[in-house]
Image (tube, rainbow, N blue to C red):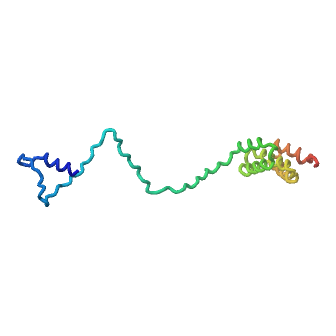
Amino acid sequence: MALATVVGVFAHDDERGKRRAPAASDPHESIAEPTPSVPAKTVGEPPAPLLAPVPTAVPGPRKPSEPPAAKPPDEASLIAKLHDLAASDPPQSLKVAREALARFPDSPDAPEFEWNVVKALANMDRYQEAEEEARGMLEKYPDNPFSVDVEHHVLNHPPNPP
């Protein structure tokens, strides 16, 4: 580097057009260090990668979302479910039929819901409860075909003995 500085001084002209050599005997004169120049970009050099912004806050664990409340089944769905269950699951049939009666007590399908209650109780060998339900059904719906069926099968003909 020092050699380049010395060579550079010889190559420059002073204001009068003469070349001047540095005085080697003058101890107070110092040779200035060359200032570093900015290197030129080469064509094949890729650009510096951009830094991604640093997040300021780390999101905490998410609270599990609760599923939306299930809409209660309508009357037609309850009847369809009772038909699907038939005698295969008497406790579930009893539950669905009682739910239907509680929700739709004045419906034209109420006698069928009541009939399913009586039938489920009989299928679970709860004959005394089935008879009580059957008597109540006959009082509410005396001329309904479901009442006639319950009267014939539950009240007039005792169930088969065990």
- In the image, farthest residue toward the top: 43
Q: Position of residue 127 (x, y in %)?
A: 88, 51
90 vs 20, nearest the viewer? 20
Splitting the image into 4 quarters, where does residue 23 fall? Answer: bottom left
Picture quarter containing residue 80?
A: top right
Count of numbered circles on the image: 0
Q: Position of residue 160 (x, y in %)?
A: 93, 46
Horizontal side, residue 86 vs residue 38: left or right: right
Furthest-right residue in this view: 161
Spot occupied by residue 118 in the image (x, y as percentages of width and height):
83, 48
Q: Nearer the viewer, residue 109 or 126?
A: 126
Residue depicted at 36% across the width and 46% down the height: 48
Q: Residue at x 88, y 44 (%)?
A: 153
Q: Residue at x 71, y 43 (%)?
A: 77
- Percent from the top left, x then y, of residue 40? 27, 43
- Which of these two is toward me, 12 or 138? 12
Q: Left of 2 or right of it: where is 102?
A: right
The outermost residue toward the bottom is 28
**Residue at image coords 80%, 42%:** 86
Q: Residue furthest left?
A: 16
Q: Nearer the viewer, residue 22 or 53?
A: 22
Q: Is residue 22 left or right of residue 127?
A: left
